[in-house]
Image: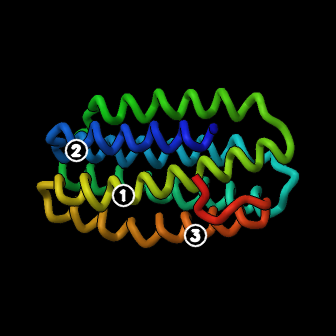
Amino acid sequence: MKTLIAVAALAAFAARAEDKKLNDPQIATIALTAHQIDIDRGKLSLHSKNAEVKQFAEQMVNDHTAGKKEVLALASKLGVKPQASDVSKSLQADARKAAARLKKEKGAAFDKDYIDTEVAYHQAVIDAVKTVLIPGAQNAEVKTALQNTVPTLEGHLQHAKNVQAQLGGKPGAK
């Protein structure tokens, strides 16, 4: 059920993003927000006793910290000042709800919810990047940066699905 809520929230994110024409500063803020969500969620998960979950969480913190730095560097290079949008604000609100839920869980229940949330989150982010953010980007460098991010996100999704299977869940279950 919790994973369905995460999927619904992310589907709503994609729908909101599609409904509104986003500009490059808003796209940059969405990218920064998405990276920060995975950094925060990863840090929250570093306490896991499960080695695979902990390793995945460490990878999320490291990779998304690097991704966030790349977005900030590109924005600075292009003179783009990140700009909040309804989409970025909604992502932040949904992330706060997920974090509050995860903070109440312990042990195997926490691990399963975290990984299920990450599978759903990465799938939704990949879909939104491919169908909304890349087509919406006006600047060629922004578009290329988004395109170059997709393989990393797909790697994260596959890694999350592998951990999910080890935890006894169905790979890709939503």
At 14% from the left and 41% from the top, the residue drawn is: 21
Reading the image, the residue beneath label 3 is 158
Q: Amino acid at mark 1?
A: Asp
Crowding at label 1, few (<14), some or many (≥20) Cα neighbours within 10 Å? some
Q: Amino acid at mark 3?
A: Gln
Estimate the x, y position of residue 79 in percent, counting from the top left.
18, 47
Mark 3 / mark 2, whichever is N-terminal: 2
Is 134 located above or below residue 96 in the figure?
below
Q: Quadrant of residue 5?
A: top right
Determine which of the numbered discs, if any, sits on residue 18 in the image.
2
Label 2 sits on a secondary structure element that is: helix
**Camera-nearest residue between 10 and 170:** 170
Label 1 sits on a secondary structure element that is: helix
At 84% from the left and 57% from the top, the residue drawn is: 50
How has the structure been colored for display?
rainbow
Reading the image, the residue beneath label 1 is 127
**Camera-nearest residue between 162 and 78:** 162
